[in-house]
Image: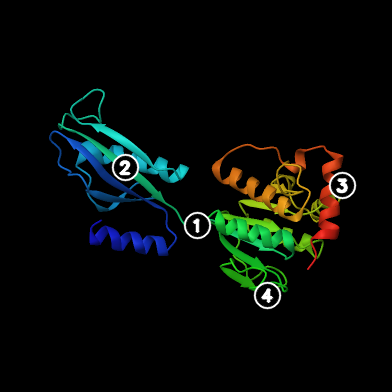
Amino acid sequence: MSMDVLKLASEMASQKRPFAVATVVRVEGSSSAKRGSKALIDAQGKIVAGWVGGGCAESAVRHQALKCIASDRPQVITLDMTDELLGVGMPCGGVMDVYIEPVLPRPELLIVGHGRIAETLASLGSLMGFSVTVDDPGADRTAFPQADRLITDDVDLSEATICPDSYVVIATQHKNDHVSLQRALEGQAGYLALVSSRYRANLVLDYLRALGTPEEKLRQVWAPAGVDIGAATPEEIALSIMSQMVAHRRGAHVEALKDARSNIEEEAAETVIRECDVS
């Protein structure tokens, strides 16, 4: 990677700006780009550094780079520049393969509360590539060694950054969970879950409903949190929540606990939250 591309890629990564790196990995015949040529494409589809060919290839690479950024998946594309009709649009000559790799900022996971569910979720979040923040007066490095940030003097989430890219899990175990949920809704968190029983979840949502919170916002809350895997321990509950977060991130569909109808699972979750997740 050339110094210009490398320097700019480092700067954009530190600024948490999404981009893609396109690399020519194979060339046959005549081509203005050589194997190993690279270009950096930003989230608007603009080549901001480097070179992978002229007009014959540039448009196709930019277009595919946007798709790779949107899906967070790398791809190899073949550009046939000998075919005016079925190739990339101009008979420039040559065929080349271009590897396009998206580089996205780490998604932000904000865990509000502490306890075994929160601790396990922080560990899983770190393993899954999330940047983990724990907001709770009882949080410490012994319980949350993988957390990127601990907030221990915040009573209303005012110090936490919540935006549409945030994943927020409220695991306060009934301690002002309605306040935390309201603040997260105001920040328009992209994923928002409440660790609770179905009964408690309905109480909290009814409270916010009475305050005038729009129904479409309340429908965005995953309460109870997680997907239906029959979880019966704090660790399994954390796994079900992380599974739901990964599915949300990747655009997959799984059955949410809030849509499940199993009384046995509901009673198990209530017992675990009430008796096992203590600290």
* Residue appearing at x 62%, y 48% in the figure: 245
- Cα distance between the residues tagged 3 and 1: 35 Å
- Where 191 falls versus 119 (above or below)? above
Whole-angstrom CA distance, mark 3 to mark 4, is 32 Å
Of callouts 3 and 1, the N-terminal one: 1
Disc 2/disc 4 C-alpha distance (Å): 44 Å
Q: Amino acid at mark 2?
A: Tyr
* Quarter-of-image position of residue 255: top right
Q: CA distance from mark 2 to mark 3?
A: 50 Å
Residue shown at the point (25%, 31%) measured from the top left = 88
Instruction: Name which residue type carries label 1.
Output: Arg
Name the residue beneath numbered marker 4.
152
Specify whether 243 is left or right of 104: right
Q: Which residue is mark 2?
A: 99
Say which of marks 3 and 4 sits in front: 3
What residue is pinned by disc 3? 267
Q: Which residue: 61% across, 61% down? A: 162
For residue 224, above or below residue 80: below
Distance between the alpha carbons at the discs numbered 2 and 1: 22 Å
Q: Which of marks 3 and 2 precedes in the sequence?
A: 2
* Placement of the C terminus among the 4 image quadrants: bottom right
The residue under label 3 is which amino acid type?
Glu
* Type of the residue with mark 4: Thr
Of labels 2 and 1, earlier in sequence is 2
Of the image marks 4 and 1, the number of the one nearer the N terminus:
1
Taking the image as shown, residue 77 lies to the left or right of residue 159, namely left
Res. 151 mark: none
Q: Can the viewer see residue 210 in this picture? A: no
The tag on residue 106 is 1
Rendering coords of residue 237 (x, y %): 73, 51
Toward the viewer: 224 or 218? 224
Q: Is residue 32 visible in this depiction of the protein?
A: yes
